[in-house]
Image (tube, rainbow, N blue to C red):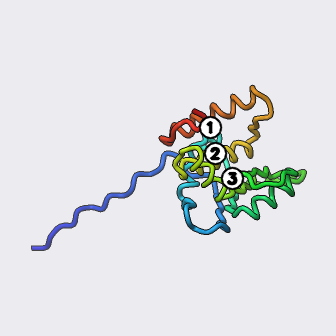
Amino acid sequence: MAAERAPRKRPAARKTAPKLCLWLKNEAGRKGVPMLRSFERWLAAIPELQRLRSWTELNILIVGTTAGRRYNRQFRGRDYATNVLSFPYEAAPGEHSGLLGDLVICAPVVAREAREQGKDPRDHYAHMTIHGALHLLGYDHEDDADADRMEALERAVLASLGIADPYA
């Protein structure tokens, strides 16, 4: 008598198809840098990115201190490495690009800040990724009202991921 096989269960389908194509390049070395899947998860928690109607692309470059300092000096005129830099993509007239922009995250700065602030490094990477992506979406913190709005959204997104308030 032949044994019957139980039907295979299919994985549950996602409620919405992912519409964000993330490119990650790590020039800083593997130590302490989260994997691509973590960055995808953090970005997927941003409500504005959840509502995308068409494919959007975002690039993340993880760099060391020397490159982080060079980018900050070249593009912001500040001669030190910073945690995250955001470069929104500006399409040419008539161009229909799905590119949202680029983030440059300086791994040693993120690690140092996490240590100094008593935070889990992965949580700080999540915060810097979300913070940078919000800049790409047009949020800023140039004045108190804008800063309050951006920080409230950061807190909400991080809380949805089970990450404590980074501003507490």
Q: Residue furthest front?
A: 116
Q: Which residue is mark 3?
A: 56
Q: Secondary structure at mark 3?
A: strand
Q: CA distance from mark 3 to mark 2?
A: 16 Å
Q: Residue furthest right?
A: 93
Q: Which residue is mark 2?
A: 130
Q: Earlier in the sequence, mark 3 or mark 2?
A: 3
**Mark 3 burial class by Cα count in 10 Å: few <14, some 14-19, many 20+:** some
Residue at 70% over, 47% down: 132
- Residue situated in front as seen by the camera: 125 or 45: 125
Can you tell which quarter of the image residue 23 is in? Answer: bottom right
Q: Secondary structure at mark 2?
A: helix
- Residue situated in front as seen by the camera: 90 or 68: 68
Q: Residue furthest top?
A: 145
What amino acid is at disc 1?
A: Glu
What amino acid is at disc 2?
A: Ile
- Residue situated in front as seen by the camera: 125 or 130: 125
Mark in the foreground, 3 or 2: 2
Residue at 86% over, 57% down: 74
Tag of residue 32: none
**3 and 1 marks in contact (CB < 8 Å):** no
**1 and 2 marks in contact (CB < 8 Å):** yes
Q: CA distance from mark 1 to mark 2?
A: 7 Å
- The x and y percentages for residue 166 are 58, 38
- The x and y percentages for residue 37 are 53, 58
Q: Earlier in the sequence, mark 3 or mark 1?
A: 3
Judge from the rendering whether residue 3 lies leftward or rightward of residue 87; answer left or right: left
Q: Which residue is mark 1?
A: 154
Q: Secondary structure at mark 1?
A: helix
Judge from the rendering whether residue 113 lies leftward or rightward of residue 103; answer left or right: left
- Residue situated in front as seen by the camera: 24 or 91: 24
Residue at 63% over, 34% down: 153
